[in-house]
Amino acid sequence: MTAEREPVALVAPDEVRWIVRTLEDAGYETWAVGGAVRDGLRGAGSTDWDFATRARPGQVRRLFHRTVPLGVEHGTVGVLDREGVLHEVTTFRKDVETDGRHAVVAFADRIEDDLARRDFTINALAWHPLRDDLLDPFHGRDDLAARVLRTVGAPEERFREDYLRVLRALRFAGRFDLTIDPATWSALREAVPHLPVLSPERIREELLKVLGGEAPASRALTLYRTSGATAVVAPELHALDDEAWARTLAEVDAVSNRRPWLRMAALLGRVGGPPLRLDEPDPGQVADLRAADDTAARAVVRAVALLSRLRVSNRQLDDVAGWVAQGVEPPRLDDGPARRRWLARVGPERLDGYADLWRARAAAAPGAAADPGPIIAALQAEVRSGAPLAVGDLAVSGRDLIALGHRPGPRFGEILDDLLDRVLDDPALNTRDTLLPLLEARAATGDEGAR
Ligand code: ATP
Ligand code: MG
């Protein structure tokens, strides 16, 4: 076993030494802590250096020219280094009270206390950039080498203090491909039923970190399922059978982690599978689900239910629902009009997302799914051609109807929609010379009373 305190040299930018020197010259013990130390020991570089210090937030702010009050009540001051990079400098803390939702902390005087309140041994490391010495009271370095995730201290207690640590454990184990230590794992399983005490926002952010991370998301998501966490936070996913789940995971991994919301759509793409279960979480949904007569429509109902519970913003919810609505297969669109109608319906701005999803699905099941390349190319060519796809692209507008003596009203929309319908069939019609007479004729039919 490695010692609690040992000389260790890590690669760190000069700015890291400058921050520590500035604080220590003023008499405040300061350490680099958290992810950057862990990643440095793993041999991976990090730009995200955080610090723990005995200085109180006001003292930190007085020592540096450029600071940002990131969370002064929690002891965190942002310090901008000379390169303009922001570092979190946080006063040593210890837990004083916990309720499972979050820990209430107080300032502490010792780095050892600060490390003891951290979640996992691999995250409870401190490194001194001036002395090149590593403080590792919980043997996180051994766990890192043995690829084990273990809580600092008694796992039952640590999860009970803050149930978010359950989801963090699944995420870190997936990210670094760690085995969860048996005692930690059994405490974690016991803690899973308590996840609903967490705010939906915190659950959502955790899930997004899994989807946005560079490691294959399937590793953490598999742990979500085997630990029972999906049954609690996402029963829609839990209901998937093993085969649908395996395909879902492969599809999520095949979508770029730089598009976490698209990965969310891949994650939810198959939840329409079972026609109707009696234990749907929200009874209000059952009517919607009955009305939804195909798998994709049911997937949308369930995806929207889940995302709403997680308090996802309307914009993101619209995007994900739009992607899920299209189903898992590319549509069959044999000619230009069919392709333009499809683009007009779903919005050309979503095409990139669909294309990524279809490619991911083909990549996840080589041979099984048809090559989406041709349909993607045909749709992209349609968008590039500049063919009108929305009322706003028409060569005529409501202004022309007003000029013709009509009073604005809901009929304007209907009339322009009809014209768009014809232009979607034949984009060559989209000139003022052709459309104005059509507009006039269409507006004149059944128009009494509207004038
Ligand atoms: P990342 O590279 O993802 O930022 P990180 O280890 O820096 O990884 P953060 O979520 O940024 O993770 O947290 C910074 C540190 O704060 C962690 O390493 C851990 O020591 C501690 N920490 C964060 N959240 C908790 C928590 N809920 N309970 C205990 N300690 C925590
Ligand atoms: Mg971090």
Image (cartoon, rainbow, N blue to C red):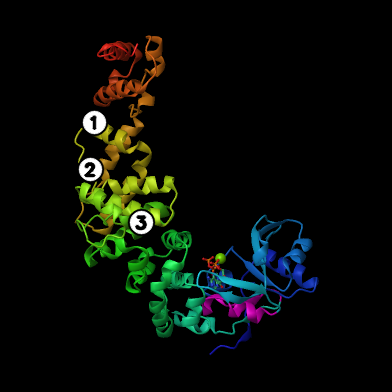
Three-letter code, disc 3: Leu
User: Residue 184's spot in the image, x, y percent?
Assistant: 43, 81
- Residue at which label 1 appears: 336
Magenta-tinted stretch: 110-130
- Residue at which label 3 appears: 306
Q: Residue at x 68, y 77 (%)?
A: 108
Q: Residue at x 40, y 80 (%)?
A: 185
User: Residue 8's spot in the image, x, y percent?
Assistant: 62, 80
- Residue at which label 2 appears: 331
Q: Is residue 44 above or below residue 333?
A: below
Where, by quadrant of the figure, is residue 227 drawn? Answer: bottom left
Name the secondary structure under disc 1: helix
Q: CA distance from mark 3 to mark 1?
A: 36 Å
Name the secondary structure under disc 3: helix
- Would residue 428 be visible to someone looking at this image? yes
Which of the two discs, 3 and 1, labels the residue nearer the N terminus?
3
Which of the two discs, 2 and 3, labels the residue nearer the N terminus?
3
